[in-house]
Amino acid sequence: MRYGTKGKDEFMHAVKRFVIVLSTLLFPALNCPAAAAEKVIIDSDMVMLFDDGVAMMMLANHPDIDLLGVTIVPGNTWVSEGTAYALRQLEILNRPDIPVAAGTRHPLRAARHETIAAEQNMFGQSSMYTGCFRRPEPASYLRVYEEKFSASPKIKPVDTHAVNFLIETIKANPGEVTVMAVGPCTNLAIAIRMAPEIIPLIKRVAYMGGAFDVPGNTTPAAEFNWWFDPEAAKMCVRAGFADQLIVGLDVCEKYRFKKEFFDRITAVDTPIAAMFRRAYGARFETDPAYSRLVWDTIVAAVVIDPTLIVEEETRWVDVDSDYGLDYGRSLGYASRGPAGTQRARILMAIDEERFWNLMVSLLTRQSDALQVK
């Protein structure tokens, strides 16, 4: 095709306009920074490995997660125990930069730990398991650490109380922090009672707690975390957070850690693999069919990758805090619930294959972790 002078000029002007428009559209995309890391606080009744410890390791090892801190609450463990276990596992990960803050020693109901046997006789039980209520409270995290690991900790908890740590960190990062409440809700409940202005500043709360369409695992009515401190759980689910995701027994009891995943994790030579071998090697050798639930790790996985969620329901949620047979029961209403209840997302199913692949990949990441014996 041939152009005259006028035609050439018009063509060149058109090309220039196209280039300018295209550059305008592409320049922001080419020069915009990478997406900011997801900021997370894990509020946990920490144990070694499954399930809180593995959840913490997954978060700490993921490049797109900024783990702002670990706050410790009583539940599976006393605060002194949970603090020692968090420090130990962060040492193994070589992550002294992640602060650990010890929290409230007891649930909100006064002296409940002193009368737990009578309570179980009155209200029934699905399990003899009562977490830290079944043993005396240790004197300090230092004593726990030294007795369990025959050494002194290489890192220490921060001086700030966990409740204050939550308040200060959320205020310093408004609208950006996901709080993973994977233990009883005591710390978070006290934080929003002390500083209710943080409620709209929290990006989301992701709970491990509750049992809506399945029986409880501590009493016929209640799941352990929300049974341990029903008053705190009720305060939190009614608080009006912008986004609430509940990972309860409805989803947690569908997925179990098995030997095939143990073999994949221990196929590498890392301190994490060594921990798994010590904890589960003999068990799987004796009983290759052994399996266990993984609870909090599911919360960590869907916080890291929300596309793992394949089924969820939205309900108005409450917790029964009347001291009786239903103490700690999770309540979910398909239509608007009682006055004060808030909407929350209840996780029902995840992409199982991708979940296990994510967990294994994060637990087998090569790092300069400390060789802690």
Image (cartoon, grey):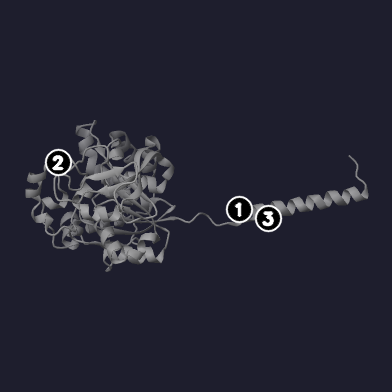
Q: Residues within 10 Å of mark 3 (few under 14, many from 20)?
A: few
Q: Residues within 10 Å of mark 2 (few under 14, many from 20)?
A: few
Q: Nearer the viewer, residue 268 or 81?
A: 81
> How far is disc 3 from disc 2 in space, using C-alphas?
64 Å
**Residue plotted at (25% across, 45% down):** 330
Q: Is residue 269 visible?
A: no
Residue 50 percent location from the top left of the image: 26, 45
The residue type indicated by label 2 comes to Ser
Q: Residues within 10 Å of mark 1 (few under 14, many from 20)?
A: few
The residue type indicated by label 3 comes to Thr
Q: Which mark is residue 24?
A: 3
Left or right of residue 121: residue 69: right
Q: Quadrant of residue 190?
A: bottom left
Which residue sits furthest top?
289
The residue type indicated by label 1 comes to Ala
Residue 100 percent location from the top left of the image: 29, 61
Left or right of residue 276: residue 136: left
Relative to 287, say whether 327 is above or below: below
Q: Nearer the viewer, residue 196 or 65?
A: 196
Q: Which residue is mark 1?
A: 29
Q: Which residue is mark 2?
A: 127
**Residue plotted at (35% across, 48% down):** 344
Lower sequence index among marks 1 and 3: 3
> How far is disc 1 from disc 3 in space, using C-alphas?
10 Å
Q: Do labels 1 and 3 touch, CB within 8 Å?
A: no
Q: Quadrant of residue 191?
A: bottom left
Lower sequence index among marks 2 and 1: 1
Badge 2 element: loop
Relative to 87, say whether 328 is above or below: above
